[in-house]
Image (cartoon, grey):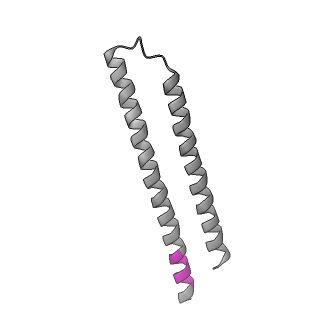
Amino acid sequence: MNKKAQSGLVGLVTTLVVVGILVIIGVLVYNKVSGSIDQTEFTAEANTTVSNVTSTFFDSIDLTTVALIVLAASVIIGILLTAFARGRN
């Protein structure tokens, strides 16, 4: 494996690890902050809004994991295409 492919793999692994950790930290912070807000005086509309925001946040976290898989696949495909292109020359 050439140096460019190795640096691509190192960058991919680093990115996946960092983004994965950031997602976990984001979920923990969101849970701590949302749990510490006193909602006893909220109206029904405010409670609905909080519920919608929470649902949307966790749906976006699911999409983040899909984005990480797509990122990993695209880098791997790029490395393979580069390796095969060099083999033809």
**Residue located farthest toward the top when viewing the structure as drawn:** 41
Q: Position of residue 27 (x, y in %)?
A: 51, 38
Please name the residue shown 41% across and 32% down the image.
54
Please name the residue shown 33% across and 23% down the image.
48
Please name the residue shown 40% across and 30% down the image.
53
Question: Is 72 in the magenta?
Answer: no
Between residue 40 and residue 82, name the one nearer to us: 40
Please name the residue shown 45% across and 60% down the image.
70
Q: Is residue 3 above or below residue 61?
A: below
Between residue 15 and residue 89, name the one nearer to us: 15
Quarter of the C terminus within the rendering: bottom right
Magenta part, dominant SS: helix
Segment colored magenta? 80-86
Quarter of the N terminus within the rendering: bottom right
Quadrant for residue 5, please give it: bottom right
The reply, left or right, for residue 48 in relation to residue 34 is left
Q: Is residue 46 above or below residue 80?
A: above
> So how many labels did they put on this image?
0
Q: Position of residue 20 (x, y in %)?
A: 55, 50
Q: Position of residue 38 (x, y in %)?
A: 48, 16
The reply, left or right, for residue 31 in relation to residue 51 is right
